[in-house]
Image (cartoon, rainbow, N blue to C red):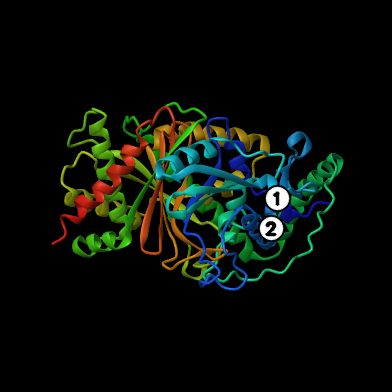
Amino acid sequence: MIEMTDRLSPLDVSFLYLETPTTAMHVGAVAIFDPPTGPAGHAGAGAPAEFDYEALVDLVSRRISLVQRYRQKVRWVPGHLANPVWVDDEDFDISYHVRRSALPRPGSIDQLQELVGRVQSRQLDRSRPLWEIYLVEGLSDGRFAIITKTHHAMVDGISAIDIGTLILDTSATPREIPDDGWIPRREPSSVSLAVNAVSDSLRRPTQVIDTVRGELADVRAVGARVAGAATGLLAAARTSLRAAPESPLNATIGEQRRYGMAATDLDDYKRVRKSHGGTVNDVVLATVAGALRVWLLTRGESVTSATTVRAMVPVSVRSDDQVGTWGNRVSAIFVDLPVGEPSPKIRLHQVSYAMKAHKESGQSVAADAIVALSGFAPPTIHSAAARLASSFSRRLFNVVVTNVPGPQFSLYAAGAPMLECYPVVPLSKGQAVSVGLTSYNGGVYYGLNADRDAMPDVDVLAQCIEESLAELIGTVS
């Protein structure tokens, strides 16, 4: 029998249902490293004198025991009687998942961005564990890059840890991970999966009755959860009535991607915030607004004082006692970025006002508001609902902007210091580009994942981000 904990949650499986040939549902990152210090240096015991493919395979092989999900694959239940389950991959092949690539020396950032776009264009093989990691050699100054791809169904589940996180240490001396002696469990048969699905369905009503007859507090908790879900859905409905502005950021997208990168300094955002108020995230959104304004002008688009771009901005809704724990509790705020405003200072004040108004009104749409109700639907209905939600994305917003704070100290992979880290956020249907950014060790790094045909000028947008921040810094007295 399959344990209940091995069955994908409604949220996890929704990312599989949402995936189409043009909307790959994997997240990732691009990290750039300096080589480890040589034998006479200070790389530390256990760290190799150089970082090569064999070193990466060895590192991933030892760390993968920390999260068993990375040696498991998805098995669908016959007849879609229940959500699919995670099962051990009896033929797990580490060399399939850890791959090697190289740029012509000395490799440039432009060449790396082109490679990232091609790597992220390909969907993950669903017959295997849903992740890949690439070592990219040949960058200038002896540097190398690591590209990761992990399916949303894995990183938004019980582990919520990207494969790239596993290989990083807070010290140049790698932490020791004992061998777990993993032996894969035998994969269940189709008959076993079907029987278990029916058994789960039969058990569910009994559990509900027991809850009703038992703890009154539990009943109240369930009622509050459903009421909260309904409130979130009503908020989503109200938002959907206000269609997003027409924008070249919304387009029919294909399977191929381009990737852009912009590196900025965290201290610059703090200086602007200290001078004008608001939050660092407000300064980020004002920077994006200014970049989109210039980008639209370079395209010859009409930009008036009333022109806006609606951004969907995921924000953390973790309570204080959840900080530092794995797992995602995210709420979405829809913000109309004032790209028509020529003054960077006024743009920032308008963004700060809008963000503050959203937080005070509570009109954010919690992700678990929809998940709480969709869990009651059979998987076949859930599949249709997930695809329907994807088709509405063009109406709701123009662009996704995600800001994930990272550690403000150096991280290492087998003694090699990580210099920069850029996120890769998947595109929804009708979205020409997604904007992800990560703050790390004094830097703020933007990753722009874009459709290859709809955004041939993604490099221009990346440059506009750096120029927009410089414009804001110019307002600091």
Q: Depth check: 372 or 15 in front?
A: 15
In the rendered image, which quarter is residue 52 located in? bottom right
- Which residue matches tag 1? 94
* Image: 49 above or below 287: below
Left or right of 126 on screen, residue 466: left
Q: Earlier in the sequence, mark 2 or mark 1?
A: 2
* Image x and y of residue 471, in percent: 19, 50
Q: What is the three-letter code of the residue carrying label 1?
A: Ile
Please report the residue visible at 43 percent of the width from the left and 34 percent of the height from the top. Answer: 431
Label 1 residue SS: helix
| Image position, residue 213 (x, y; %) | 71, 61
Of 134 and 341, nearer the camera is 134
Q: Is residue 30 visible?
A: yes
- 6 and 343: which is toward the camera: 343
**Is 240 rendered above or below residue 403?**
above
Look at 15% across and 46% down and name the residue there: 343
Residue 237 in the image: state x and y as whole percent. 43, 39
Snapshot quadrant of residue 303: top left
- Residue that appears at 17% across and 52% down: 345
Element at label 2: helix
Q: Relative to residue 167, is residue 391 depicted above or below?
A: above
Q: Which residue is mark 2?
A: 61
Give the amino acid type for the residue marked by disc 2 in the picture.
Ser
Numbered marks: total: 2
Q: Position of residue 446 (x, y in %)?
A: 38, 49
Identified at 57% across, 58% down, the residue is 51
Distance between mark 2 and mark 1 Cα atoms: 7 Å
Q: Tag 2: Cα neighbours inside 10 Å, few (<14), some, or many (≥20)?
A: some
Mark number displayed over residue 137:
none
Quadrant in the rendering for residue 265:
bottom left
* Dots 2, 1 in contact, CB < 8 A: yes
